[in-house]
Image (cartoon, coloured by chain):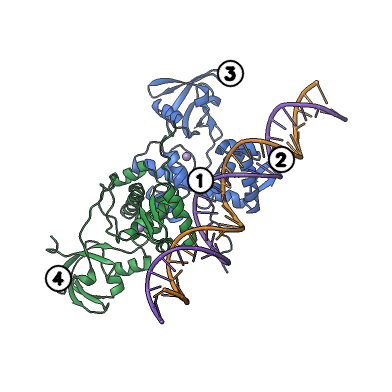
Chain colours: A green, B blue, C orange, D purple
Amino acid sequence: MTAPTADELTTSVEDYLKAIYAITRQGHPASTSDIAGWLGLSAPSVSGMVKRLAGQGLLEHRPYKGVELTAKGRRGALTVLRRHRIIESYLVERLGYSWDSVHQEAERLEHAVSEVLIERMADALGNPEFDPHGDPIPRPDGSMAEATSTPMPDIAVGQEGVLRQVRSNDAEQLRFIASVGLKPGAVFTVLGQQPFHGPTTIRLGDTEQVIGHQIASLLWCEVPGEQG
Amino acid sequence: MTAPTADELTTSVEDYLKAIYAITRQGHPASTSDIAGWLGLSAPSVSGMVKRLAGQGLLEHRPYKGVELTAKGRRGALTVLRRHRIIESYLVERLGYSWDSVHQEAERLEHAVSEVLIERMADALGNPEFDPHGDPIPRPDGSMAEATSTPMPDIAVGQEGVLRQVRSNDAEQLRFIASVGLKPGAVFTVLGQQPFHGPTTIRLGDTEQVIGHQIASLLWCEVPGEQG
DNA sequence: TAGTAAAATTAGGCAACCCTAAATATGGCA
DNA sequence: TGCCATATTTAGGGTTGCCTAATTTTACTA
Ligand SMILES: [Mn+2]
Ligand SMILES: [Mn+2]
Ligand SMILES: [Mn+2]
Ligand SMILES: [Mn+2]
C-alpha cells in the first residue's frame, strides 16, 4: 500500500534524461559517447547508468546501438526542462540576472525546487512560453510552443528575419552575441552570406554586423512569409 | 596549485553542521543521539559521519562525550543558516508562501543556491535581519542580531510583550499560532499564567486567548523595560 | 572476406551515506 | 565497589554514481 511509483528522480538521473532528450531531438538514438560527451562523464559510467535507467523504464537501450527515452523518460525530461527554463526566466526577470549567467544557477536549482515553487514563479511571470534564450518552456502537460525557425546562415540574402532562439549555454558566446545587439526578438536583414562556412552580414538597427559561421549557426530565426 | 580548500560541502554535511549548531546553542556538546534524533538518522550513521567531519576539521569529537563545531564548522553552519533564512524570507515576501510552508522548500534550496543568488535575494528584500519566524539572519560575516527575549510562560502577569520569534518548524503548530493572530511583531498583555505547565492567557487586540504551555513556550517575546 | 580501429561493455574499485546487529564504554546505583 | 542499562562505536552490508583498465562488438576498409 505504498506509493505505486517512487517517482523521485535523483539529480544525476534528471540530468541524464535532459541530455538524452536534447541529443535525441535530432531524430537519432543517443550513443553512449554522445551522452558521455554531453555530461562530461566517462563512457563506462554512462553504460552503467543507462542500464539502471532502462531497468526503471525510463529509456530503451539497444546495446551497441543507442538509447531512446520511453514516454515515462520523456515526461521526466520535460518536467526538468520546464523547471530549468522557468528558473532561468525568473532569475532574469526578477533578480537581475543576465542571460549569460543564469544557466549554471538553473542547472542546480532545477533539482531542488518543488512543483509548487515552479508554478508560483511561472504565475508571477504570467506563464511565459519562452525562456531568456528563446527556448520554449514545456507546459505542465508536456506540450510546448514549437516555432518553425531557421539557422541564420540558411536565410537568403535580402530576407528580413527575427531572432527567436539562441542555442548556446556558453557564457562567453552569449555575452558576445548580446554585445552585438542580438537577443530574441531582434529584427535584422541579411545583407550577405559567404559560402564554405563563411560569415553572415546583417543590418541590425543602423549598424552592420559581420557574424562568423560558428555563432551565426546558433541563431535560429523566423523569416516572415516562409513556412507560414 | 589547486584551490587550497575544496570548501564545497555536500547536502548531508551542511545539514549535519546546521543540526550541531542548533543543538550546541544550549551550551553543551551535541551527543550522537541528539544529532541522530534531530536529523532522523540512526546513531551508527551519525558516528560514522562525525568521524568524517572531524577529519575535515569541521568539528571536534571527544569519543563517548560529544561533538562541538570548530570555527570552520561554525562558519559553514552560519552560511547555510543565512541561505535558509533568506530563502524563507524571499518565498514569503515575493512568492506568496505562508510561513508554515516555507521551511521544507528552504531545507532543499539552501543546498542548491549560489552565493550570488542569495545576495540578490537579500538585496531585493532590503537585507532583512530576521526571517518570517523571527529567527535572526546571519550576516555574510557570520554575525547576527541577537535580541534578548523570553519564552511567553516566563513573562509576569500584567506585563506587556512583543512576540519576536516563533521557535517551530512544524506546519501544524505554525498554522495554529497564526490562526490565533500571533506572528512576530504582535503586541500582547499577559493576563494569566497558570503553574505546573498550565496555559497562559493573553489579551491580543480586543480578544483574549488561552495558550497551552507547549505552544506558549515556543513563543519568544521581548518585554519592554526588561533587560534594557 | 579478413583485419583493424573505434565504440561499447564488462570487470574491478572507490567514496559518500545510509542501515542493522554486535561489541564496548560510561555513569549511576545498589 | 561492582553491576547494569544506556549510549556509543565497530563490524558488516547495500545503493548510487563515478573512475580506469580490460575485453568485446561493430563497422569500415583493404
Ligand atoms: Mn539553460
Ligand atoms: Mn542539472
Ligand atoms: Mn526554517
Ligand atoms: Mn537542508
Cα–Cα gap, marks 1 and 4: 56 Å
The picture places residue C29, in percent across and down from the top left corner, at: 77, 23
> Within 10 Å of the Cα at label 3, are there few (<14), some (14-19), or many (20+) other Cα atoms?
few
Which amino acid type is marked by label 1?
Answer: Leu
Say which chain tag 2 marks.
Answer: B
Name which residue lies at 38% across and 59% down. A66
The picture places residue A101, in percent across and down from the top left corner, at: 37, 60
With respect to residue A1, does B7 lie above or below?
below
Q: Secondary structure at mark 2?
A: loop
The picture places residue A18, in percent across and down from the top left corner, at: 37, 55
Say which chain tag 1 marks.
Answer: B
With respect to residue A36, does A144 lie above or below?
above
> Within 10 Å of the Cα at label 1, are there few (<14), some (14-19), or many (20+) other Cα atoms?
many
Q: Is residue B222 visible?
A: no
Q: Is residue A164 left or right of residue B44?
A: left
Which amino acid type is marked by label 4?
Answer: Gln
Residue labelled with disc 4: A159
Q: Is residue B157 visible?
A: yes
> Within 10 Å of the Cα at label 4, are there few (<14), some (14-19), or many (20+) other Cα atoms?
some
Tell me which image quadrant ligand 1 sits in.
bottom left
Q: Secondary structure at mark 4?
A: loop
Q: Which mark is residue B64?
A: 2
Cα–Cα gap, marks 2 and 4: 78 Å
Q: Are marks 1 and 4 on the same chain?
A: no
Cα–Cα gap, marks 4 and 3: 85 Å
Residue labelled with disc 1: B81
Q: Are marks 4 and 3 on the same chain?
A: no
Cα–Cα gap, marks 2 and 1: 28 Å
Residue labelled with disc 3: B196
